[in-house]
Image (spheres, rainbow, N blue to C red):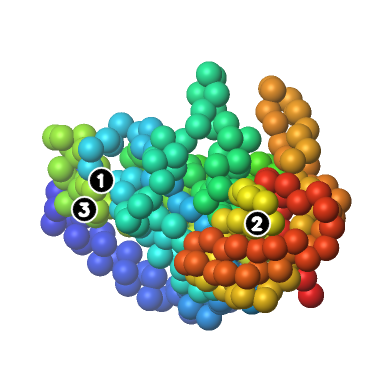
Amino acid sequence: MNKKIKAFYVKIHMFAWILFLPFCIPLITGCSTYSNMKKKTKRIVRDYKALDEDLKKRVAITLFENKTAFVGKGLEESFTKDLVEAIKMSCQDILVLEPHDPGYPNYLVNLPRKTSGVIDNFNLAKTGRQLGLNTVVTGSLIDIKNYKKKRGILWFKDIYNFVQVRVMVEVYDTQTGAKLFDESYMHEIEAEEEYVESTKLTNEIRTDTINDALKSIAADMGEQICYAVVLQPWKGYITSTFAEKIIISSGKNVGIKPGNIFEVYDSNGVFKGAEERKFFIPGLKTGEIKITAVYPDSAEAVCFSGQNIQPGSSISLKD
């Protein structure tokens, strides 16, 4: 289509929308523009609060895998950064361990996997406990493609170019090794006219267009991850015992203080599910411990009651 002719049609479309807009808004309650405005407003005012406000949960974010044809453009790094910011905005009372943090553990860079290639949830949870993590977030950029579709009303329809992006996320609970959250997200965004002209020759999708779609996905994903995490009660873990000294993998950074008393629960039971997957089984209370010394990411305690306090046990703050 000639640019001058197309510009003429665009002006007609704009004029038509101006005439019809006052009638469309009350009638089309599912209008995407209104829905997006409402969703953005919610993101501004919402701040999910944890059930245990005295202790902060630790959430680790892994670098998302890029399974699309657009490798080497920094998309996964940009998306992971946007996701971290979205989670922090929605959940201001949790601690986020992100890929660019100093001392980021190698086991989160190379996630444990079974021979089939799927993530080994049991070993992921087991190591996550040693690091004082409550959840581990991972996922993949699944697909990026462009397509054309008609848009408009009545006889004012025209063909527009769109970019569609799909991302998958999984959130693992370190207490059980089960998934708290497993979801696939899709977002489409209209490409600019310059993009339409360039794709006739190059068949490429502009990186900034993809990043705009990924940013929108990250905002929705971050909010839902936050909601899933804060609904879970805080759990810590005993990593080792030496004579009368008990070491836990959480400390001052999450809000633990000397004198805190924690209930101890057996968490070493194992359940085998389908496809040889294994999960931890939360068990009965075995005793209580009292914190004697606190460090940034660990703490020392002594037995306060009970006798069978074992490494791997989970702990929760006593009311």
Given residues 129 and 98, the one toward you in this image is 129
Q: Amino acid at mark 1?
A: Gly
Residue matched to label 3:
193
Given residues 269 and 160, the one toward you in this image is 269
Is 262 displayed left or right of 138 in the figure? right
Circle on res. 246: 2
Q: Amino acid at mark 3?
A: Glu
* Residue 305 versus residue 131 in the image, above or below: below
Q: Amino acid at mark 2?
A: Ile
Real-space CA distance between mark 3 and mark 1, rounded to the nearest whole angstrom: 24 Å
Given residues 115 and 258, the one toward you in this image is 258
> Which type of secondary structure does the marked residue at label 1 adopt?
loop
Q: Residue at x 23, y 38 (%)?
A: 72
* Relative image position of residue 29 (x, y in whole percent): 60, 69
Quadrant showing the N terminus: top left
> Which type of secondary structure does the marked residue at label 2 adopt?
strand
Residue matched to label 1:
74
